[in-house]
Image (tube, helix red, strand yellow):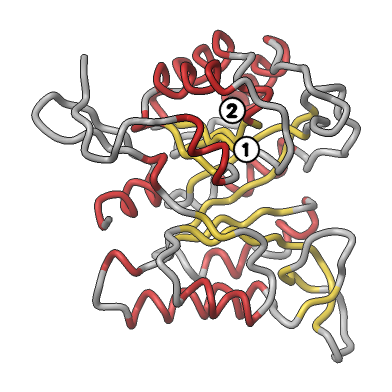
């Protein structure tokens, strides 16, 4: 588990015939760790990565100017600030003698303003395994949610060279929307933003499972063009999303378990029938 957690933190994929495949799909996730109670529960669990949302708001019962707090829109109050969240995880990792019990964090920024005001806090925790996440571009299917400003996010994110940049697209999928794909234009725009902002650190691309399953050629293009950045994809899904399971499995196996993080509901993960963690890599 130590080796898997290190891979989750650094997103470094290495394959050889002589050693077991680095199966990143076995990394486990806690979601919306946005209050003190859930944070303590997650730290006490066997979960590897803690995902949490950051907005500008206020602490419950306290007045003052807006500051980065752990909450998901439309909420603007929380009992947990980003400063407290990062310090609590850092102290947990410092005290843990078992490396497999240390945690990584995925910070999901809901606005560029929240990210701007979080810069000093992130900078104080350079040794903490951190992913900096945002939906920075509009995506399928004709998504209308406003993305986080891509140029500003990448410029600020690139200052934290030890962090993994997790950059994706807004999506409109699920419910009555059961068909869609990532287009070559959407992939091309992401590549252009990465290049124009001179990104030179580890990157992962969050892709929605139901859409990614229909988008293998363009996703392979994206990962090939960013291979020098130790790039990977993070496959995610909401409950109830329509997913062509066989197509998704084919995509994951083509990309490789060593370049794929899997953050989907348990029933979907079970249907994929992926190779076990000790499977041998094949050339």
Residue highlighted by disc 1: 167
On the image, the x and y values in percent for residue 195 come to 57, 23
On the image, the x and y values in percent for residue 129 come to 43, 59
| Nearer to the camera, 204 or 142 | 142
Q: In the rendered view, does 174 fall on the left or right side of 168? A: right
Residue highlighted by disc 2: 194
- The residue that appears at 46% across and 49% down in the rendered structure is 161
| Nearer to the camera, 276 or 195 | 276
Q: In the rendered view, does 8 fall on the left or right side of 60? A: left
| SS label for mark 1 | strand
| Nearer to the camera, 67 or 168 | 168
Cβ atoms at labels 2 and 1 below 8 Å apart: yes
On the image, the x and y values in percent for residue 33 come to 63, 67
Between the C-alphas of marks 2 and 1, the distance is 10 Å
The quarter of the image holding the N terminus is bottom left
Find residue 248 and name its label: none
| SS label for mark 2 | helix
Q: Quadrant of residue 60?
A: bottom right
The quarter of the image holding the C terminus is top left
- The residue that appears at 85% across and 90% down in the rendered structure is 62
Residue sticking out furthest to the left? 18
Please tell me whether residue 233 is drawn above or below residue 29 in the rendered image: above
Please tell me whether residue 153 is drawn above or below residue 120 in the rendered image: above
| Front of the two marks 2 and 1 | 1
Q: In the rendered view, does 150 fall on the left or right side of 30? A: right
| Nearer to the camera, 72 or 239 | 239
Please tell me whether residue 199 is drawn above or below residue 17 in the rendered image: below
Q: In the rendered view, does 9 fall on the left or right side of 68? A: left
**In terms of sequence position, does the residue under pointer 2 or pointer 1 come before the other?**
1
- The residue that appears at 31% across and 78% down in the rendered structure is 96
């Amino acid at each position: 588990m130590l080796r898997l957690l290190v891979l989750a933190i650094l997103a470094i994929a290495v394959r050889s015939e002589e050693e077991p495949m680095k199966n990143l799909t076995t990394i486990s996730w806690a979601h919306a760790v946005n209050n003190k109670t859930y944070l303590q529960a997650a730290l006490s669990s066997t979960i590897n990565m803690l995902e949490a949302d950051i907005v500008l708001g206020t602490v419950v019962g306290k007045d003052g100017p807006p500051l980065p707090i752990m909450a998901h829109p439309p909420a603007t109050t929380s009992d947990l600030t980003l400063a407290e969240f990062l310090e609590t995880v850092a102290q947990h990792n410092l005290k843990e003698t078992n490396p497999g019990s240390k945690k990584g964090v995925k910070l999901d920024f809901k606005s560029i303003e929240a990210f701007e005001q979080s810069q000093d806090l992130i900078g104080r925790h350079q040794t903490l395994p951190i992913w900096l996440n945002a939906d920075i571009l509009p995506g399928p299917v004709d998504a209308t949610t406003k993305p986080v400003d891509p140029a500003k996010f990448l410029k600020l994110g690139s200052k934290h060279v030890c962090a993994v940049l997790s950059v994706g697209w807004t999506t409109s999928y699920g419910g009555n929307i059961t068909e869609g794909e990532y287009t070559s234009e959407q992939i091309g725009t992401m590549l252009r933003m990465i290049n124009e902002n001179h990104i030179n650190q580890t990157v992962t691309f969050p892709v929605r499972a139901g859409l990614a399953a229909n988008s293998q050629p363009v996703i392979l293009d994206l990962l090939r063009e960013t291979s020098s950045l130790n790039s990977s994809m993070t496959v995610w899904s909401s409950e109830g999303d329509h997913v062509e399971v066989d197509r998704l499995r084919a995509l994951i196996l083509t990309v490789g378990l060593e370049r794929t993080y899997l953050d989907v509901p348990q029933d979907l993960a079970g249907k994929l029938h992926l190779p076990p963690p000790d499977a041998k890599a094949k050339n």
